[in-house]
Image: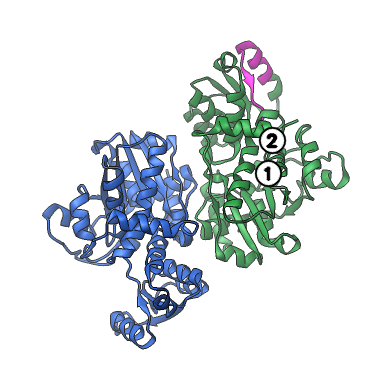
Chain colours: A blue, B green
C-alpha cells in the first residue's frame, strides 16, 4: 500500500526532473463558483499531463540494471507519452503497445519521443498477450498506468505540491477535486494530503455515465461502467477502480462528483479564457465540478486539478464555440 | 533611469502578489528550433500578461495617501486589466480611459475587475486631454504603460525570475527574446539580466512593418512606424520607442528581430500544442523568432518570453487552422 514515505521518496527522486506546476486562480472563476477556486495546472507538466510523474517514479525506482533493459507500457494516450519521455531521459528503450487505429498524431508523438511503437488490432488481438510476450522475449519491465505502488507514489507528488502551495497562500482547509480514471492520481493525492494537510478533503470527479468510482465509494464495493466509450472525456474512462487505488480512495476520499460532457467542455473554454491554459475535456472535469457544484461543497476553497492538456484543435474549437 | 536596485525593490514588494511564472520547454520545440528553447510563460501572470507586474510596482511605490485617491490609465488592452486588478487588490479606485469602439469583451472585463471605464471617441476626442482633465478633477495618479521608472522596474522582475530559473537548470549563457512594444518589458528584463546574468543577451522582437525598435537600435536614434494598425500583433504595436526605455535598450540589448504575422500565428499554435499555454499573437513573436531564427543566433540556448495570453476564440481558431 502506497504510503506518504513512498511519496516523499518519489518527490526526492523527481527533483530537477519533474516540473512543479503552478497553482493558478482568476477572480472571474471565483465569481462563477461563488467561492475561491485554485487550479493545479498539471497540464503544464512534461508531456502535458500528470502521467509523467508516475512514469518518472516508476523508472527511478527500478534497479538500474533492470531499467537498462527497457520498459513497456500499454496506452494510446497520456501514459504512453509520460513513459516514453521518462525512458528517453534515462537513455533506456521504451516499447509502447498502441491500437493500430489510434490517432496518427498520438502514434507520431510517441515515436517522436523515442519510443518503439508496437501496434495491435483492437478487434482481433489481445494487447495483454502481445505485451506479455514482448516483455518476456525482450526482458522489458511493464510500467502500469495506475494500479502499481510506484505509479501511485509518483502521482502523489502532485499532492505534496498542492499542500505546500496552498499553505504558502494561507489555505489549509479545502476540497480538492481530482479527475479520476483508474484512481492513480486521486489516491496518490489523497495519501499525500491525509498526511500533510489533513483538513483537505479529496473528491474524485468523473464523467456522467462513467462514474464507477463514485458508485464504488457510495456502495462500498467496486462497481463497473456499463460502457467504455461515448464520453468526450475518454482519457479518464476506465472499467472499474484499481485493486490498489480503490482501498486508498475508500480510506481517504469523500464522495465522488459527476459532470456532463457539456460541463467539461465549458470548463475547457473557461480555462482557456481565464487561466490561459490548454486543458483536455477529461482533464477539465474537476474544474467543471468546481464551477457548477462548489455551492454544494462545505469548504470555502475548492482546489481543482487540471490533469492533462492533450486536446486536438477540433475539440478545442468545439469548446470555444459554446463559450458564451 | 531604472536600476537593478529599483527592480530588486519592486520584486520585494511583489512577493506573494505577483505570480512567479514557470519556465517551460518541449523536446518538440527544441527540434524545430535546432537548439534548446525555454519559454517564460508570462501569459500565466495575473490578468494574462506581464502588465500586472508593472502596475503592481507602480501602485506599491505610491505614497499610501496618494494611492488612496485612485489611479488612472489609458489602455484598451492588457495594461488596463493589469492596473484594474492591482488597484482592486489595494482597494483603491481605478479609472481606465478606453476607446468607445474597443471590443465589448475588453470593456466588460475591465469593468468586471472593478474599474470605472470612461470611453472616448477615437476620431473626434483627445484621450490625453480627457485623462488629464479627469486626473486633475478627481485627484487620480496616472499609471503609464511603459515609459515610467516604476513600470519598467516592475517588468524587470520578470528578468530576475528568468536569471534565477535558468540558473536552477544550469543555463547561464543564452539569448533572451522579448516581445517589444514600447520597450518596458524589454528594457526591464535587460537591466535585470545585465546585473545578474551578464552572459545573457536580450533581443527585442517585433512584428514585420512595426519594427521601430529594431530600426532605432540599428540607426542609433528613435525611429517611428509608418502605420499603427494592420498587424495581428496589435498588443505590441506602438509608434516609437519610449524616452526612458530606448536608452536602456541601447545600452543593454543586441539587435532586434522581426517576424511575420503568419510566423506569430504558427507560434501561437505550437505553444497550444506543445506547451499547453494560450498565447496571443503579439505575445508569441519571441517564440516565433526562436522557432524560425534560432540558427542565426550564436547562443546554444534561446529563452523566449511569452508575454500575454489575451486572445479571442476566433484568432486562436485561425492559428490552429494553420497548425500543420
Q: Chain of mark 2?
A: B
Task: Tell me how far mark 2 sits from mark 1, CA to CA.
Answer: 9 Å
Q: Is residue B27 left or right of residue A201?
A: right
Q: Earlier in the sequence, mark 2 or mark 1?
A: 2
Do the numbered discs 2 and 1 sit on residues whose CB atoms are within 8 Å? yes
Q: In the displayed structure, would residue A190 be above or below residue A104?
A: above
Q: Secondary structure at mark 2?
A: helix
Q: Is residue A217 left or right of residue B190?
A: left
Q: Is residue B167 visible?
A: yes
Q: Residue furthest bottom?
A: A137
Query: Magenta stretch?
Result: B130-144
A70 horizontally vs A124: left or right: right
Residue B196, which numbered label?
Answer: 1
Secondary structure type for disc 1? helix
Q: Is residue B96 visible?
A: no
Is B140 included in the stretch rendered in magenta?
yes
Q: Chain of mark 1?
A: B
Vertically, is A11 above or below B117?
below
Q: Nearer the viewer, residue B169 or A253?
A: B169
Q: Which mark is residue B4?
A: 2
Amino acid at each position: 500500500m502506497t504510503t506518504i514515505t513512498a511519496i516523499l521518496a518519489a518527490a526526492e527522486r523527481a527533483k530537477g526532473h519533474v516540473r512543479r506546476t503552478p497553482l493558478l486562480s482568476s477572480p472571474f472563476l471565483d465569481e462563477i463558483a461563488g467561492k475561491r477556486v485554485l487550479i493545479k495546472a498539471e497540464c503544464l507538466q512534461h508531456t502535458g499531463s500528470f502521467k509523467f510523474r508516475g512514469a518518472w517514479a516508476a523508472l527511478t525506482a527500478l534497479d538500474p540494471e533492470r531499467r537498462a533493459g527497457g520498459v513497456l507500457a500499454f496506452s494510446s494516450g497520456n501514459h504512453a507519452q509520460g513513459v516514453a519521455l521518462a525512458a528517453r531521459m534515462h537513455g533506456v528503450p521504451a516499447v509502447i503497445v498502441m491500437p493500430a487505429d489510434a490517432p496518427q498524431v498520438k502514434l507520431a508523438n510517441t515515436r517522436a519521443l523515442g519510443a518503439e511503437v508496437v501496434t495491435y488490432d483492437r478487434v482481433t488481438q489481445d494487447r495483454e498477450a502481445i505485451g506479455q510476450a514482448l516483455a518476456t522475449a525482450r526482458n522489458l519491465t511493464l510500467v502500469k498506468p495506475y494500479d502499481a505502488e510506484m505509479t501511485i507514489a509518483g502521482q502523489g507528488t502532485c499532492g505534496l505540491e498542492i499542500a505546500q502551495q496552498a499553505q504558502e497562500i494561507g489555505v489549509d482547509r479545502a476540497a480538492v477535486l481530482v479527475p479520476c480514471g483508474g484512481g492513480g492520481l486521486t489516491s496518490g493525492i489523497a495519501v499525500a494530503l491525509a498526511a500533510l494537510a489533513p483538513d483537505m478533503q479529496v473528491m474524485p470527479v468523473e464523467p456522467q455515465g462513467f462514474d464507477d468510482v463514485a458508485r464504488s465509494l457510495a456502495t462500498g464495493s467496486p462497481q463497473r461502467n456499463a460502457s467504455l466509450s461515448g464520453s468526450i472525456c475518454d482519457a479518464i474512462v476506465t472499467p472499474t477502480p484499481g485493486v490498489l487505488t480503490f482501498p486508498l480512495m475508500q480510506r481517504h476520499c469523500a464522495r465522488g462528483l459527476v459532470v456532463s460532457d457539456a460541463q467539461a467542455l465549458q470548463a475547457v473554454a473557461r480555462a482557456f479564457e481565464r487561466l490561459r491554459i490548454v486543458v483536455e475535456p477529461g482533464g477539465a472535469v474537476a474544474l467543471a465540478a468546481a464551477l457548477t457544484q462548489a455551492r454544494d461543497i462545505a469548504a470555502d476553497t475548492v482546489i481543482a486539478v487540471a490533469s492533462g492538456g492533450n486536446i486536438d484543435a477540433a475539440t478545442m474549437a468545439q469548446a470555444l464555440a459554446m463559450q458564451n
